[in-house]
Amino acid sequence: MASPAMESFDLVITNGVCVTASDVAAFDVAIKDEKIVLLAPTGSLASANATRIIDAEGGYVTPGGIDAHVHLQEPPMFGKGTTSDNFESGTRSAIAGGVTTIVPFAPQQKHEPSLLKALAETHDKARDNSYCDYGFHLLVGNPSEQALAELDTIPQEQGITSLKIYMTYTALQLRDDQILSVLLKAREKRILTMIHAENGDVLNWLTDQLEARRLFDPKYHSHSRPPILEAEATNRAIALSSIIANTPILLVHVSDPGAAARIRQAQTNGQPVFAETCPQYLFLTRDDLESCSGFDGAKHVCSPPPRDRASQDAIWTGVKNGTFTILSSDHCPFNFDDADSGKKACITEEHPVGRFRHIPNGIPGIETRLPLIFSSSDRLPLTKIVEVSATNPAKLYGLYPRKGAMIPGVSDADLVVWYPHDTGRSITITNGALHHATDYTPYEGQTVNNWPRFTVLRGKVVWDKDNGGILGDKSYGQFLKRLPTSLDGIWDTVDKQGPFDVSAF
């Protein structure tokens, strides 16, 4: 490569402090042909031959965020509720919040025998409608013979190496024998299995008990989902994965310290068990739901629900000590003031404050995830923030080092330039300032001390907060074919244990 003085670049970011999962250091970043091509001493590229130069003014420069748990433009699987964000609005919101890659779901419903059909339909929705890069998880609602057979070829041919299953929700819940069949196929094909762990049968029983006492308000959503339901299902998921010769699993959106403790125990014992948590379990509590009057509590209805303050502190500890591998948004948005397909679809004349069992479950959060967590550097080191929000998701979902890193010649030029951190900046989150298509945010009124100043996707500035906002276009995002997880060389370790052998029991 020619010397920096002679070389021409597409973009240079100068005077920034680069933060990766392992280091914090002052470097200039040079970008060409969508890749990071050079890290140079700070200020040394300020006069480089470049199409554009951004002066970071001492602000942090991080890899673009990867949000690996996102629901967009999904069909109504839980009654009347339909997600309010499509791929265009959801990814527009993503880049405004510093997210350059998402991994949403291709949902197979219980009545559908094929995964490939669901996948094709999701491709059609996303194609030329994404401001950021994206991959897909399969959402397996019906592990039919056909669906399991399709998993033989999907990872190699489609580049999809993860799937999600549910232990709750009537529309999606799998029985234990079905879960075992999915885990067996996933182990054979090096597919990471994501599990929503709540005991659906007990949940339904508790809901019936609450309704028998005429307790319908949104606040009773959390009463129907006590922490033990999550802890029990988590323990069962770990036990089932151990039966299938310790196939790797990821427990998604963990909220309960009891569940986190069981995960930590499995990890200590050497099981390939990973965990994800979300901002709602770090920045919201049960009080946010129960303090609301009337139907307003529906704005905080998600599953599992946020827990009490002590649980919130324990989840923070789990992020810090590595129990949680990744931090995702679980962006699952429904409009609040929508009586047809939003939160208010459950309101009737008989139930003027709705029935909590029919409130569409989920909250928006794709744009606020990084500003919230980045403003918590008093609780987490900056390197840990990058690790759980970008680098580990890239490794876990087969995108590293193309994504989630800043390796010259290897990594895509996906970057976030933050404001200088010592300016005393304070930003109040308001829904009117966000870029999703949802009519509320559960974080309304919370303050953060930073926001992405620039978001760069493959060398292109797609978000400039001070000069135009959204600069990207909805056809720029690319579909990413993914490899099996590379985190900790886990598949090589698992393979050394040998294949599943029922006669071993």
Image (cartoon, rainbow, N blue to C red):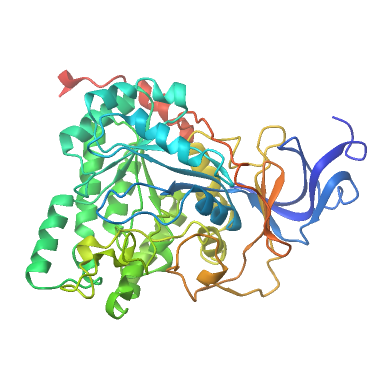
Total labels: the figure holds 0
Placement of the N terminus among the 4 image quadrants? top right
Residue 149 visible here: yes
> Where does the C terminus fall, quadrant-wise?
top left
- The answer to whether any part of residue 325 appears in the image is no
Instruction: Judge left or right: residue 203 versus residue 88.
Output: left
Residue 492: x and y, percent? 42, 24
Say which quarter of the image contains residue 121: top left
Q: Is residue 477 above or below residue 65?
A: above
Work out whether residue 495 or residue 97 is closer to the camera in this orientation and state it. Answer: 97
480 up-or-down from 254: above or below: above
> Residue 487, position in %: x, y?
47, 35
Residue 382, quarter of picture: bottom right
Residue 370 figure quarter = bottom right
**Looking at the image, residue 108 lies above or below residue 420:** above
Residue depicted at 31% across the width and 56% down the height: 81
In the shown orientation, is residue 135 left or right of residue 303? right
Along the line of sight, the residue nearer the viewer: 401 or 430: 430
User: Percent x, y for residue 124?
Assistant: 47, 36
Q: Residue at x 31, y 47 (%)?
A: 263
Q: Is residue 70 above or below residue 134?
A: below
Relative to residue 300, is residue 354 drawn left or right?
A: left
**Camera-nearest residue between 456 and 489:** 456
Q: Position of residue 113 (x, y in %)?
A: 25, 30
